[in-house]
């Protein structure tokens, strides 16, 4: 059964919490150790996050070449989230070498004076626990950029209906199966 993307990272800067935008401005995916990266998601009670359905997408853009993307499945983490209903996800230890290799490729290009950027985005699959999703459904997303850092809010109690593309995505979310 196919499930659809629940939240896209930031869902448009106009909806984002300034504290989270500041935290993201301090993140350098090209250099920061990814071992401490974690996200916390608090979906509305009418949505359930799917096991193994939360992904970090790293995109390496080298000059005019086609972007190179790698998708890393995040796993539930034992870390405590910023609120009780938040589910925390982190990278698998086995994915860290591949992510660090992307960082090294980016660094090599930059040191050679070539254009290169490394960006991150997040997506999560969900299923609906109700027949129809309510128009007033709200969700929250936080990010932690280092193991010793607090979670910074990206979206807090944000009406999902305000997220660009939400209406189309909401119509494609399948019911949860037992």
Image: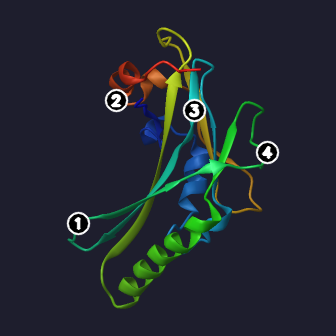
| Residue 18 placement: quadrant | top right
Can see residue 156? no
Q: Earlier in the sequence, mark 3 or mark 1?
A: 3
Q: Residue at x 54, y 59 (%)?
A: 25
Q: Residue at x 77, y 62 (%)?
A: 148
Q: Residues within 10 Å of mark 2 (few under 14, many from 20)?
A: few
Q: Earlier in the sequence, mark 4 or mark 2?
A: 4
- Identity of the residue furthest to the top in this view: 131
Mark 3 vs mark 1, foreground winner is 3
Q: CA distance from mark 4 to mark 2?
A: 30 Å
Q: Residues within 10 Å of mark 4 (few under 14, many from 20)?
A: few
Q: Residue at x 62, y 71 (%)?
A: 33
User: In the rendered image of this protein, does residue 67 appear above or below residue 164?
Assistant: below
Name the spot of residue 156 as percent of width and height, x first. Answer: 61, 33
Residue behind mark 4? 80
Can see residue 171? yes
| Residue 66 - label | 1
| Residue 2 placement: quadrant | top left
User: In the rendered image of this protein, does residue 146 appear above or below residue 82?
Assistant: below
Residue behind mark 3? 49
Q: Earlier in the sequence, mark 4 or mark 3?
A: 3
Mark 4 vs mark 2, foreground winner is 4
Mark 4 vs mark 3, foreground winner is 3
Q: Residue at x 74, y 42 (%)?
A: 81
**Tags 2 and 1 touching, CB below 8 Å:** no
SS type, badge 1: loop
SS type, badge 3: strand
Residue behind mark 2? 165
Q: Quadrant of the N terminus?
A: top left
User: In the rendered image of this protein, does residue 108 appear above or below residue 84?
Assistant: below
Q: Quadrant of the C terminus?
A: top right
**Tags 4 and 2 touching, CB below 8 Å:** no
């Amino acid at each position: 059964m196919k499930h659809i993307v629940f939240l896209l990272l930031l869902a448009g800067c106009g909806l984002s919490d300034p504290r989270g935008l500041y935290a993201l401005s301090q993140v350098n995916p090209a250099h920061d150790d990814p071992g401490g990266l974690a996200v916390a998601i608090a979906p509305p009670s009418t949505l359930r996050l799917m096991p193994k359905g939360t992904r970090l997408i790293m995109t390496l853009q080298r000059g005019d070449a086609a972007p190179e993307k790698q998708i890393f499945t995040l796993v539930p983490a034992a870390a405590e989230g910023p609120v009780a209903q938040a589910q925390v996800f982190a990278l698998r230890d086995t994915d860290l070498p591949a992510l660090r290799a992307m960082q090294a490729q980016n660094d090599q290009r930059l040191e050679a004076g070539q254009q290169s950027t490394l960006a991150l985005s997040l997506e999560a699959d969900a299923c609906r626990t109700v027949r129809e999703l309510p128009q007033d459904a709200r969700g929250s997303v936080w990010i932690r950029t280092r193991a010793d850092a607090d979670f910074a809010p990206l979206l807090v109690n944000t009406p999902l209906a305000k997220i660009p593309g939400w209406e189309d995505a909401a119509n494609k979310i399948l019911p949860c199966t037992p």
